[in-house]
Protein backbone atom coordinates (compact mmCIF):
# COMPACT_ATOMS: atom_id res chain seq x y z
CA UNK A 1 0.00 0.00 0.00
CA UNK A 2 1.39 3.39 -0.90
CA UNK A 3 -0.85 5.50 1.33
CA UNK A 4 -0.65 3.60 4.61
CA UNK A 5 -2.86 4.19 7.62
CA UNK A 6 -0.11 5.92 9.63
CA UNK A 7 0.52 8.31 6.76
CA UNK A 8 -3.19 9.14 6.46
CA UNK A 9 -3.49 9.50 10.24
CA UNK A 10 -0.47 11.77 10.34
CA UNK A 11 -2.02 14.18 7.85
CA UNK A 12 -5.37 14.05 9.66
CA UNK A 13 -3.69 15.03 12.90
CA UNK A 14 -1.93 17.94 11.23
CA UNK A 15 -5.22 19.11 9.73
CA UNK A 16 -6.94 18.78 13.12
CA UNK A 17 -4.22 20.89 14.67
CA UNK A 18 -4.83 23.58 12.04
CA UNK A 19 -8.56 23.47 12.86
CA UNK A 20 -7.94 23.64 16.61
CA UNK A 21 -5.67 26.63 16.18
CA UNK A 22 -8.55 28.40 14.43
CA UNK A 23 -6.47 28.68 11.24
CA UNK A 24 -8.52 26.39 8.98
CA UNK A 25 -9.37 28.13 5.72
CA UNK A 26 -12.63 27.37 3.96
CA UNK A 27 -13.66 28.40 0.50
CA UNK A 28 -17.03 29.94 -0.20
CA UNK A 29 -18.70 29.07 -3.49
CA UNK A 30 -19.78 32.11 -5.49
CA UNK A 31 -22.65 31.42 -7.88
CA UNK A 32 -22.29 34.57 -9.96
CA UNK A 33 -19.64 36.54 -11.86
CA UNK A 34 -17.24 38.62 -9.78
CA UNK A 35 -18.80 42.03 -9.16
CA UNK A 36 -19.90 44.55 -6.52
CA UNK A 37 -22.85 42.28 -5.78
CA UNK A 38 -22.24 38.53 -5.70
CA UNK A 39 -24.31 35.44 -4.88
CA UNK A 40 -22.61 33.29 -2.25
CA UNK A 41 -23.21 29.83 -0.80
CA UNK A 42 -21.78 29.62 2.71
CA UNK A 43 -21.42 27.36 4.48
CA UNK A 44 -21.52 24.63 1.85
CA UNK A 45 -25.16 23.61 1.31
CA UNK A 46 -26.64 26.75 2.92
CA UNK A 47 -29.10 28.79 0.85
CA UNK A 48 -27.42 31.19 -1.56
CA UNK A 49 -27.34 34.84 -0.50
CA UNK A 50 -26.86 38.06 -2.41
CA UNK A 51 -24.16 40.10 -0.70
CA UNK A 52 -22.11 43.20 -1.43
CA UNK A 53 -18.50 42.25 -2.00
CA UNK A 54 -15.87 44.22 -0.08
CA UNK A 55 -12.98 41.76 -0.38
CA UNK A 56 -12.20 41.37 -4.07
CA UNK A 57 -9.16 42.82 -5.85
CA UNK A 58 -11.59 43.91 -8.57
CA UNK A 59 -10.37 47.48 -8.09
CA UNK A 60 -11.46 48.86 -11.44
CA UNK A 61 -14.63 46.78 -11.68
CA UNK A 62 -13.43 45.19 -14.92
CA UNK A 63 -13.66 41.50 -13.94
CA UNK A 64 -17.03 41.18 -15.65
CA UNK A 65 -17.07 44.28 -17.83
CA UNK A 66 -19.08 43.61 -21.03
CA UNK A 67 -16.37 45.07 -23.31
CA UNK A 68 -13.70 42.89 -21.70
CA UNK A 69 -15.88 39.80 -21.99
CA UNK A 70 -16.61 40.61 -25.64
CA UNK A 71 -12.90 41.10 -26.35
CA UNK A 72 -12.08 37.80 -24.66
CA UNK A 73 -14.74 36.07 -26.79
CA UNK A 74 -13.29 37.61 -29.93
CA UNK A 75 -9.80 36.54 -28.84
CA UNK A 76 -11.02 33.02 -28.27
CA UNK A 77 -12.48 32.93 -31.79
CA UNK A 78 -9.49 34.54 -33.46
CA UNK A 79 -6.60 32.81 -31.67
CA UNK A 80 -8.09 29.68 -30.11
CA UNK A 81 -8.39 28.29 -26.62
CA UNK A 82 -4.84 27.43 -25.69
CA UNK A 83 -1.27 27.33 -26.90
CA UNK A 84 -0.27 23.81 -25.89
CA UNK A 85 3.30 25.03 -25.64
CA UNK A 86 5.66 27.18 -23.65
CA UNK A 87 6.54 30.55 -25.17
CA UNK A 88 9.91 29.78 -26.74
CA UNK A 89 8.85 26.59 -28.52
CA UNK A 90 5.54 27.50 -30.18
CA UNK A 91 3.53 29.28 -27.49
CA UNK A 92 3.87 32.90 -28.59
CA UNK A 93 1.26 34.71 -30.66
CA UNK A 94 1.29 38.20 -32.12
CA UNK A 95 -1.15 39.26 -29.37
CA UNK A 96 1.30 38.22 -26.62
CA UNK A 97 3.84 40.62 -28.10
CA UNK A 98 1.18 43.29 -28.54
CA UNK A 99 0.23 43.02 -24.87
CA UNK A 100 3.87 43.16 -23.80
CA UNK A 101 4.41 46.34 -25.81
CA UNK A 102 1.29 47.90 -24.38
CA UNK A 103 2.23 47.03 -20.79
CA UNK A 104 5.68 48.51 -21.40
CA UNK A 105 4.10 51.77 -22.50
CA UNK A 106 1.59 51.76 -19.65
CA UNK A 107 4.16 51.04 -16.95
CA UNK A 108 6.74 53.42 -18.44
CA UNK A 109 9.50 50.84 -18.79
CA UNK A 110 11.77 49.54 -21.57
CA UNK A 111 10.45 46.00 -22.07
CA UNK A 112 7.98 43.48 -20.59
CA UNK A 113 7.71 39.70 -20.36
CA UNK A 114 4.47 37.89 -19.55
CA UNK A 115 4.40 35.10 -16.98
CA UNK A 116 1.62 32.64 -16.06
CA UNK A 117 1.07 34.69 -12.89
CA UNK A 118 2.78 37.36 -10.81
CA UNK A 119 3.64 34.61 -8.35
CA UNK A 120 5.62 33.05 -11.21
CA UNK A 121 7.17 36.38 -12.21
CA UNK A 122 8.44 36.77 -8.65
CA UNK A 123 9.54 33.14 -8.53
CA UNK A 124 11.64 33.60 -11.66
CA UNK A 125 13.07 37.09 -11.71
CA UNK A 126 15.58 37.11 -8.85
CA UNK A 127 17.25 33.86 -9.85
CA UNK A 128 17.44 35.06 -13.44
CA UNK A 129 19.17 38.38 -12.74
CA UNK A 130 21.24 37.92 -9.56
CA UNK A 131 23.94 35.54 -8.41
CA UNK A 132 26.08 34.85 -5.37
CA UNK A 133 28.08 38.08 -5.57
CA UNK A 134 24.87 40.15 -5.34
CA UNK A 135 22.53 41.08 -2.49
CA UNK A 136 18.74 41.41 -2.21
CA UNK A 137 17.49 43.83 0.45
CA UNK A 138 13.74 43.47 0.96
CA UNK A 139 11.14 45.28 3.01
CA UNK A 140 10.05 42.93 5.80
CA UNK A 141 6.40 42.99 4.71
CA UNK A 142 6.82 42.00 1.05
CA UNK A 143 4.35 39.55 -0.46
CA UNK A 144 4.85 35.81 0.10
CA UNK A 145 5.63 35.24 -3.58
CA UNK A 146 8.62 37.59 -3.30
CA UNK A 147 9.85 35.74 -0.23
CA UNK A 148 9.65 32.49 -2.21
CA UNK A 149 11.37 34.00 -5.25
CA UNK A 150 14.21 35.29 -3.08
CA UNK A 151 14.65 31.79 -1.63
CA UNK A 152 15.30 30.44 -5.11
CA UNK A 153 18.01 32.97 -5.92
CA UNK A 154 21.66 32.40 -5.01
CA UNK A 155 22.21 36.04 -3.99
CA UNK A 156 22.71 37.10 -0.37
CA UNK A 157 19.37 37.79 1.35
CA UNK A 158 18.73 40.65 3.74
CA UNK A 159 15.74 42.71 4.90
CA UNK A 160 14.94 46.16 6.27
CA UNK A 161 12.23 47.13 8.74
CA UNK A 162 8.95 47.97 7.04
CA UNK A 163 9.28 51.31 5.19
CA UNK A 164 12.14 52.32 7.52
CA UNK A 165 14.42 54.37 5.25
CA UNK A 166 17.12 54.82 7.89
CA UNK A 167 17.33 51.06 8.28
CA UNK A 168 17.40 50.55 4.52
CA UNK A 169 20.24 53.08 4.27
CA UNK A 170 22.25 51.21 6.91
CA UNK A 171 21.76 47.96 4.99
CA UNK A 172 22.87 49.60 1.74
CA UNK A 173 26.01 50.86 3.47
CA UNK A 174 26.64 47.42 4.94
CA UNK A 175 26.42 45.78 1.52
CA UNK A 176 28.66 48.13 -0.47
CA UNK A 177 31.07 45.21 -0.91
CA UNK A 178 28.58 43.31 -3.07
CA UNK A 179 28.63 43.52 -6.86
CA UNK A 180 24.95 44.44 -7.29
CA UNK A 181 22.42 45.62 -4.73
CA UNK A 182 18.68 45.18 -5.34
CA UNK A 183 16.14 46.95 -3.12
CA UNK A 184 12.89 44.98 -3.09
CA UNK A 185 9.46 46.28 -2.09
CA UNK A 186 5.75 46.02 -2.74
CA UNK A 187 4.27 49.21 -4.21
CA UNK A 188 1.12 48.93 -2.10
CA UNK A 189 1.31 46.60 0.90
CA UNK A 190 -1.70 44.33 0.80
CA UNK A 191 -2.51 43.97 4.49
CA UNK A 192 -2.24 47.62 5.61
CA UNK A 193 -2.87 49.33 2.27
CA UNK A 194 0.09 51.67 2.77
CA UNK A 195 2.37 52.75 -0.09
CA UNK A 196 6.13 52.24 -0.33
CA UNK A 197 8.15 55.48 -0.13
CA UNK A 198 9.40 55.00 -3.66
CA UNK A 199 10.75 58.53 -4.03
CA UNK A 200 13.03 58.04 -1.03
CA UNK A 201 13.89 54.50 -2.09
CA UNK A 202 14.95 55.68 -5.57
CA UNK A 203 17.04 58.48 -4.01
CA UNK A 204 18.81 55.96 -1.76
CA UNK A 205 19.33 53.63 -4.70
CA UNK A 206 21.07 56.45 -6.59
CA UNK A 207 23.21 57.38 -3.62
CA UNK A 208 24.29 53.79 -2.89
CA UNK A 209 24.41 52.39 -6.43
CA UNK A 210 21.48 49.99 -6.11
CA UNK A 211 18.66 48.80 -8.36
CA UNK A 212 14.99 49.02 -7.37
CA UNK A 213 12.37 46.26 -7.64
CA UNK A 214 8.68 47.03 -7.08
CA UNK A 215 5.79 44.54 -7.09
CA UNK A 216 2.86 46.76 -8.04
CA UNK A 217 0.13 44.10 -8.04
CA UNK A 218 -2.10 46.16 -5.71
CA UNK A 219 -1.49 49.37 -7.67
CA UNK A 220 -1.33 48.81 -11.45
CA UNK A 221 -4.30 50.46 -13.13
CA UNK A 222 -5.40 52.81 -10.35
CA UNK A 223 -2.64 54.23 -8.10
CA UNK A 224 -1.20 57.48 -9.47
CA UNK A 225 -3.02 60.25 -11.31
CA UNK A 226 -3.42 58.16 -14.49
CA UNK A 227 -3.33 54.79 -12.76
CA UNK A 228 0.15 53.75 -13.85
CA UNK A 229 1.13 52.67 -10.37
CA UNK A 230 3.00 53.57 -7.21
CA UNK A 231 5.92 55.00 -9.19
CA UNK A 232 3.58 57.52 -10.80
CA UNK A 233 2.09 58.41 -7.39
CA UNK A 234 5.56 58.95 -5.91
CA UNK A 235 6.94 60.96 -8.84
CA UNK A 236 9.47 58.34 -9.99
CA UNK A 237 7.75 57.13 -13.16
CA UNK A 238 10.38 55.68 -15.52
CA UNK A 239 12.91 55.25 -12.73
CA UNK A 240 12.07 51.76 -11.45
CA UNK A 241 14.46 49.09 -12.75
CA UNK A 242 12.16 46.08 -12.26
CA UNK A 243 8.38 46.13 -11.89
CA UNK A 244 6.36 42.95 -11.46
CA UNK A 245 2.60 43.05 -11.50
CA UNK A 246 -0.46 40.85 -11.94
CA UNK A 247 -3.23 40.81 -14.52
CA UNK A 248 -5.33 39.12 -11.83
CA UNK A 249 -6.35 42.19 -9.82
CA UNK A 250 -7.16 45.66 -11.18
CA UNK A 251 -6.20 44.80 -14.76
CA UNK A 252 -9.20 42.56 -15.43
CA UNK A 253 -8.76 39.98 -12.71
CA UNK A 254 -8.33 36.81 -14.81
CA UNK A 255 -4.75 35.64 -14.38
CA UNK A 256 -1.24 36.28 -15.57
CA UNK A 257 1.63 38.50 -14.56
CA UNK A 258 4.71 40.15 -15.92
CA UNK A 259 8.23 41.36 -15.34
CA UNK A 260 8.67 44.84 -16.79
CA UNK A 261 11.71 47.06 -16.62
CA UNK A 262 15.20 47.63 -18.01
CA UNK A 263 15.66 45.94 -21.40
CA UNK A 264 18.62 43.79 -20.35
CA UNK A 265 16.89 42.59 -17.21
CA UNK A 266 13.77 41.55 -19.10
CA UNK A 267 15.98 39.82 -21.68
CA UNK A 268 17.75 37.92 -18.87
CA UNK A 269 14.32 36.71 -17.73
CA UNK A 270 13.50 35.62 -21.29
CA UNK A 271 16.72 33.60 -21.32
CA UNK A 272 16.73 32.24 -17.79
CA UNK A 273 13.52 32.65 -15.75
CA UNK A 274 12.27 29.13 -15.14
CA UNK A 275 8.50 29.80 -14.81
CA UNK A 276 8.69 31.53 -18.21
CA UNK A 277 10.76 28.78 -19.80
CA UNK A 278 8.92 25.78 -18.42
CA UNK A 279 5.26 26.79 -18.07
CA UNK A 280 2.61 27.96 -20.53
CA UNK A 281 1.94 31.65 -20.47
CA UNK A 282 -1.35 33.52 -20.43
CA UNK A 283 -4.09 32.00 -22.63
CA UNK A 284 -5.06 33.88 -25.82
CA UNK A 285 -8.48 34.96 -24.58
CA UNK A 286 -6.96 36.47 -21.43
CA UNK A 287 -4.39 38.30 -23.56
CA UNK A 288 -7.22 39.67 -25.70
CA UNK A 289 -9.22 40.63 -22.60
CA UNK A 290 -6.26 42.39 -21.01
CA UNK A 291 -5.55 44.32 -24.21
CA UNK A 292 -9.12 45.64 -23.96
CA UNK A 293 -8.61 46.49 -20.27
CA UNK A 294 -5.58 48.60 -21.19
CA UNK A 295 -7.57 50.28 -23.98
CA UNK A 296 -10.27 51.16 -21.48
CA UNK A 297 -7.92 52.73 -18.94
CA UNK A 298 -5.08 54.13 -21.06
CA UNK A 299 -6.58 57.56 -21.58
CA UNK A 300 -9.78 57.40 -19.54
CA UNK A 301 -9.20 57.83 -15.82
CA UNK A 302 -12.87 57.81 -14.85
CA UNK A 303 -12.68 54.34 -13.28
CA UNK A 304 -9.69 55.06 -11.09
CA UNK A 305 -11.24 58.45 -10.24
CA UNK A 306 -14.45 56.75 -9.13
CA UNK A 307 -12.44 54.25 -7.12
CA UNK A 308 -10.65 57.14 -5.40
CA UNK A 309 -13.96 58.81 -4.60
CA UNK A 310 -15.42 55.53 -3.31
CA UNK A 311 -12.38 54.94 -1.13
CA UNK A 312 -12.54 58.38 0.43
CA UNK A 313 -16.29 58.13 1.05
CA UNK A 314 -15.95 54.67 2.60
CA UNK A 315 -12.95 55.55 4.74
CA UNK A 316 -14.60 58.71 6.07
CA UNK A 317 -17.89 56.87 6.60
CA UNK A 318 -16.20 54.23 8.77
CA UNK A 319 -14.30 56.89 10.71
CA UNK A 320 -17.52 58.84 11.32
CA UNK A 321 -19.13 55.64 12.64
CA UNK A 322 -16.31 55.34 15.16
CA UNK A 323 -14.23 52.52 13.69
CA UNK A 324 -10.46 52.34 14.07
CA UNK A 325 -9.17 52.60 10.47
CA UNK A 326 -5.63 52.29 9.16
CA UNK A 327 -4.73 55.41 7.22
CA UNK A 328 -3.47 55.07 3.67
CA UNK A 329 -3.73 56.17 0.05
CA UNK A 330 -4.97 52.91 -1.45
CA UNK A 331 -8.40 51.28 -1.84
CA UNK A 332 -7.42 48.79 0.88
CA UNK A 333 -9.13 49.98 4.08
CA UNK A 334 -8.44 47.78 7.11
CA UNK A 335 -10.89 48.03 10.01
CA UNK A 336 -8.76 47.24 13.06
CA UNK A 337 -10.24 44.86 15.65
CA UNK A 338 -6.99 43.43 17.16
CA UNK A 339 -8.72 40.30 18.50
CA UNK A 340 -8.93 37.27 16.15
CA UNK A 341 -12.25 35.99 17.47
CA UNK A 342 -13.80 39.45 17.32
CA UNK A 343 -12.68 39.74 13.69
CA UNK A 344 -14.33 36.42 12.86
CA UNK A 345 -17.53 37.32 14.73
CA UNK A 346 -17.80 40.71 13.05
CA UNK A 347 -17.18 39.15 9.63
CA UNK A 348 -19.92 36.56 10.24
CA UNK A 349 -22.41 39.18 11.45
CA UNK A 350 -21.63 41.39 8.46
CA UNK A 351 -22.37 38.44 6.20
CA UNK A 352 -25.75 38.06 7.89
CA UNK A 353 -26.33 41.73 7.06
CA UNK A 354 -25.46 41.12 3.40
CA UNK A 355 -21.88 42.36 3.46
CA UNK A 356 -19.02 40.10 2.44
CA UNK A 357 -15.79 41.17 4.17
CA UNK A 358 -13.25 38.79 5.60
CA UNK A 359 -11.43 38.79 8.93
CA UNK A 360 -7.64 38.53 8.84
CA UNK A 361 -5.64 37.37 11.83
CA UNK A 362 -2.37 35.69 12.73
CA UNK A 363 -0.42 34.36 10.85
CA UNK A 364 -1.65 36.42 7.88
CA UNK A 365 -1.16 39.61 9.94
CA UNK A 366 0.91 39.99 13.15
CA UNK A 367 -0.51 38.81 16.48
CA UNK A 368 -2.84 41.37 18.12
CA UNK A 369 -3.41 43.03 14.72
CA UNK A 370 -6.57 41.17 13.64
CA UNK A 371 -8.77 43.14 11.31
CA UNK A 372 -11.48 43.15 8.66
CA UNK A 373 -9.79 44.12 5.42
CA UNK A 374 -12.21 45.99 3.20
CA UNK A 375 -11.39 46.74 -0.41
CA UNK A 376 -13.13 49.20 -2.66
CA UNK A 377 -13.97 48.86 -6.32
CA UNK A 378 -15.03 51.18 -9.10
CA UNK A 379 -17.92 48.71 -9.47
CA UNK A 380 -19.34 49.94 -6.15
CA UNK A 381 -22.02 52.59 -6.46
CA UNK A 382 -22.81 54.96 -3.61
CA UNK A 383 -25.81 52.80 -2.80
CA UNK A 384 -23.51 49.78 -2.18
CA UNK A 385 -21.32 51.88 0.07
CA UNK A 386 -24.26 53.25 2.07
CA UNK A 387 -25.65 49.74 2.59
CA UNK A 388 -22.20 48.56 3.62
CA UNK A 389 -21.80 51.40 6.11
CA UNK A 390 -25.25 50.69 7.57
CA UNK A 391 -24.26 47.05 8.10
CA UNK A 392 -20.98 48.09 9.75
CA UNK A 393 -22.90 50.50 12.01
CA UNK A 394 -25.31 47.78 13.13
CA UNK A 395 -22.65 45.12 13.72
CA UNK A 396 -20.28 47.58 15.39
CA UNK A 397 -23.03 48.64 17.80
CA UNK A 398 -23.90 45.01 18.54
CA UNK A 399 -20.30 44.34 19.63
CA UNK A 400 -19.97 47.64 21.44
CA UNK A 401 -16.86 48.68 19.53
CA UNK A 402 -17.95 51.98 17.96
CA UNK A 403 -15.81 54.85 19.17
CA UNK A 404 -13.25 52.58 20.81
CA UNK A 405 -9.54 53.02 20.18
CA UNK A 406 -6.97 50.25 20.11
CA UNK A 407 -6.32 50.14 23.84
CA UNK A 408 -10.01 50.07 24.72
CA UNK A 409 -10.70 47.23 22.28
CA UNK A 410 -7.72 45.28 23.61
CA UNK A 411 -8.78 45.88 27.23
CA UNK A 412 -12.28 44.66 26.52
CA UNK A 413 -11.63 41.73 24.19
CA UNK A 414 -7.99 40.78 24.75
CA UNK A 415 -5.75 39.93 21.81
C1 LIG B 1 -1.70 39.01 -5.65
C2 LIG B 1 -0.26 39.28 -5.60
C3 LIG B 1 0.66 38.46 -6.28
C4 LIG B 1 0.23 37.21 -7.00
O1 LIG B 1 -0.42 37.52 -8.19
P1 LIG B 1 -0.91 36.33 -9.13
O2 LIG B 1 -0.82 36.89 -10.50
O3 LIG B 1 -2.29 35.99 -8.70
O4 LIG B 1 0.04 35.19 -8.93
C5 LIG B 1 1.99 38.79 -6.24
N1 LIG B 1 2.42 39.88 -5.54
C6 LIG B 1 1.58 40.67 -4.87
C7 LIG B 1 2.11 41.85 -4.13
C8 LIG B 1 0.22 40.39 -4.87
O5 LIG B 1 -0.61 41.17 -4.17
Image (cartoon, rainbow, N blue to C red):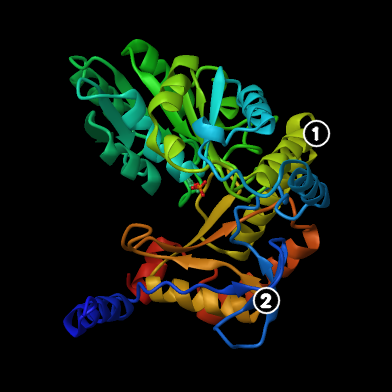
Place residue 228 in its image quadrant.
top right
Nearer to me, 82 or 108:
82
Element carrying mark 1: loop
Q: Specify whether 237 is left or right of 196.
A: right
Q: Residue at x 33, y 79 (%)?
A: 19
Task: Tell me: residue 130, above or below residue 286.
Answer: above
- Labelled pair 1, 2 in contact (Cβ < 8 Å): no
Place residue 11 in its image quadrant.
bottom left
Q: Residue at x 65, y 37 (%)?
A: 221
Place residue 102 in its image quadrant.
top right
Task: Tell me: residue 88, above or below residue 329.
Answer: above
- Badge 1: few (under 14), some or many (20 or more) residues near its Cα, within 10 Å? few
Q: Specify whether 205 is left or right of 319.
A: left
Measured Cα–Cα span from mark 1 to mark 2: 32 Å
**Which badge, 1 or 2, is on the more N-terminal residue?**
1
Q: Position of residue 351 (x, y in %)?
A: 60, 77
Q: Position of residue 151 (x, y in %)?
A: 26, 40
* Location of the C terminus (image quadrant): bottom left
Nearer to me, 273 or 15:
273
Element carrying mark 2: loop
Residue beneath label 2, please?
354
Residue beneath label 1, please?
300
Is residue 359 something one can see in this rendering? yes
* Location of the N terminus (image quadrant): bottom left
Is residue 400 something one can see in this rendering? no
Q: Residue at x 59, y 74 (%)?
A: 29
Q: Position of residue 156 (x, y in %)?
A: 21, 29
Nearer to me, 85 or 98:
85
Q: Specify whether 128 is left or right of 276.
A: left
Task: Tell me: residue 167, above or below residue 398.
Answer: above
Q: Position of residue 365 (x, y in %)?
A: 37, 57
Amino acid sequence: MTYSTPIREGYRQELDAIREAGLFKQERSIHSPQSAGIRVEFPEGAPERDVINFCANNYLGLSSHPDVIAAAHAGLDARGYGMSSVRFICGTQDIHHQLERKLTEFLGTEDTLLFPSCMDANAGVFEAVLDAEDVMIADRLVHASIVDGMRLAPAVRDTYKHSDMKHLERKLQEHQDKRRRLIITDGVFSMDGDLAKLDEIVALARQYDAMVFVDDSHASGFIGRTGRGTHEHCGVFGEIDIITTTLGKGLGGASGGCVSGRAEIVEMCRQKARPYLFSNTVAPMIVAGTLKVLDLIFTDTSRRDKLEWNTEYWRQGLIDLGFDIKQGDSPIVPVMLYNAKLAQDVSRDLYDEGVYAIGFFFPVVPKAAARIRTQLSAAHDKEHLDKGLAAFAKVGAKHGILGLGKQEIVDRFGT
